[in-house]
């Protein structure tokens, strides 16, 4: 089975009916917007079925099943609750899960009452996550696609894209940003929890406010700089300032976060989607402007 092929309503209905017959009569419907790593279907009114789309995403099922209940009590907003874990079947080769349905719209589509308040709420979530007990937790590695580790893992890929995109962006300035990120890559102290994919489509908004954070498939413990890319992928101006102030990022962490954000933007800029390329080009401009303004300025982080 290739990525996502064959994951359709009929398959989900059969898996649920055989493995969880008490839910077998509930309707299964596709969600309006689906992800890349997993396919998600609504199960009745109050549940969702989540199925990895490829082998490299399957370990996340076991990881989330183990660690989401551990993290949830310490966090200020809801995260997914796993109700059951299914087995491979009917040609589908990976473990899968049934979860509670979390209401709300993703932040990239929702109306947000106050962008500064929203940015601070996301930062407060991250501070709480970073404060969770790390005993026995999975260290950054292949399972997190090396989020939570040094961005040096992606050095060759980043430099290839910089070489190819010289007619689209200021590659000299971008190279400085990237090299500053690598130079600041050693994070002292005890590793902390990171989410690993803190993007707008993994933040749920209800009533204009942040109400849930989803998709912990890349989570682990390590360097939290990878979670700060939201500063450039979604936030701007006062919202970005509130985010940094509330999360308490020092200069070195912020430099590493810029590096992660630049890497992600370059991947999109080198892609095939014209809309994605335009957004990524604008994002690179934001990253370079932020570095020019603050890159060599030491600013105190908020007290932890």
Image: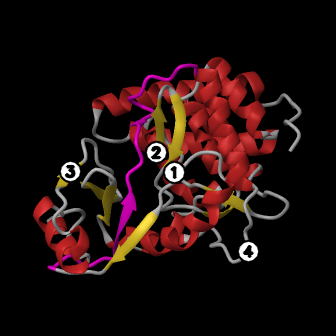
Label 2: which secondary element: helix
Relative image position of residue 129 (x, y in whole percent): 68, 53
Quadrant of image for the N terminus: bottom left
Q: In front here: 304 or 272?
A: 304
Q: Are marks 2 and 1 in contact (CB under 8 Å)?
A: yes
Q: In front here: 207 or 180?
A: 207
Q: Can the viewer see residue 16 in this picture? A: yes
Say which label, 3 or 4, has the lower sequence index: 3
Say which label, 3 or 1, has the lower sequence index: 3
| Side of 29 where 240 appears, left or right | right
Q: Can the viewer see residue 178 in this picture? A: no
Mark 3 vs mark 1, CA separation in Å: 22 Å
* 183 is higher (above) or lower (below) than 286: below
Q: In front here: 287 or 48?
A: 48
Location of mark 1 (residue): 197
Quadrant of image for the C terminus: top right
Q: Give the colour scheme of this rendering.
A: secondary structure
Location of mark 3 (residue): 30
Location of mark 2 (residue): 202
Assess whether residue 91 is covered by the magenta stretch.
yes
Label 3: which secondary element: strand
Magenta residues, as a range? 90-114
Q: Residues within 10 Å of mark 3 (few under 14, many from 20)?
A: some
Label at residue 20: none
Label 4: which secondary element: loop
Location of mark 4 (residue): 135
Q: Are marks 3 and 1 in contact (CB under 8 Å)?
A: no
- The residue at the far left in this view is 10
């Amino acid at each position: 089975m290739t990525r996502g092929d064959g994951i359709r309503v009929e398959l989900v209905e059969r898996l649920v009916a055989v493995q969880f017959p008490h839910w077998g009569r509930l309707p299964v419907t596709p969600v309006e917007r689906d992800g890349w790593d997993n396919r998600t279907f609504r199960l009745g009114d109050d549940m969702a079925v989540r199925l990895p789309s490829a082998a490299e995403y399957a370990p996340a099922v076991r990881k989330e099943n183990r660690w989401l209940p551990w993290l949830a009590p310490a966090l200020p907003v809801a995260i997914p609750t796993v109700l059951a874990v299914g087995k491979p079947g009917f040609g589908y080769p990976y473990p899968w899960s049934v979860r509670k349905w979390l209401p709300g719209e993703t932040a990239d589509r929702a109306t947000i009452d106050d962008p500064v308040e929203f940015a601070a709420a996301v930062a407060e979530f991250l501070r709480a996550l970073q404060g969770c007990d790390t005993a026995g937790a999975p260290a950054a590695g292949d399972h997190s696609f090396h989020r939570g580790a040094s961005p040096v893992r992606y050095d060759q890929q980043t430099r290839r894209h910089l070489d190819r995109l010289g007619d689209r962006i200021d590659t000299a300035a971008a190279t400085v940003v990237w090299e500053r990120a690598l130079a600041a890559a050693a994070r002292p102290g005890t590793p902390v929890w990171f989410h690993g994919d803190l993007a707008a489509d993994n933040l749920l908004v209800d009533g204009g406010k942040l109400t849930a954070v989803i998709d912990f498939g890349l989570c682990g413990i390590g360097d939290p700089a990878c979670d700060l890319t939201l500063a450039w992928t979604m936030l701007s101006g006062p919202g970005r300032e509130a985010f940094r102030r509330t999360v308490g990022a020092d200069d070195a962490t912020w430099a590493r976060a810029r590096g992660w954000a630049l890497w992600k933007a370059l991947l999109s800029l080198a892609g095939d989607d014209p809309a994605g390329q335009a957004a990524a080009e604008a994002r690179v401009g934001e990253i370079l402007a932020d570095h020019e303004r603050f890159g060599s300025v030491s600013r105190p982080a908020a007290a932890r």
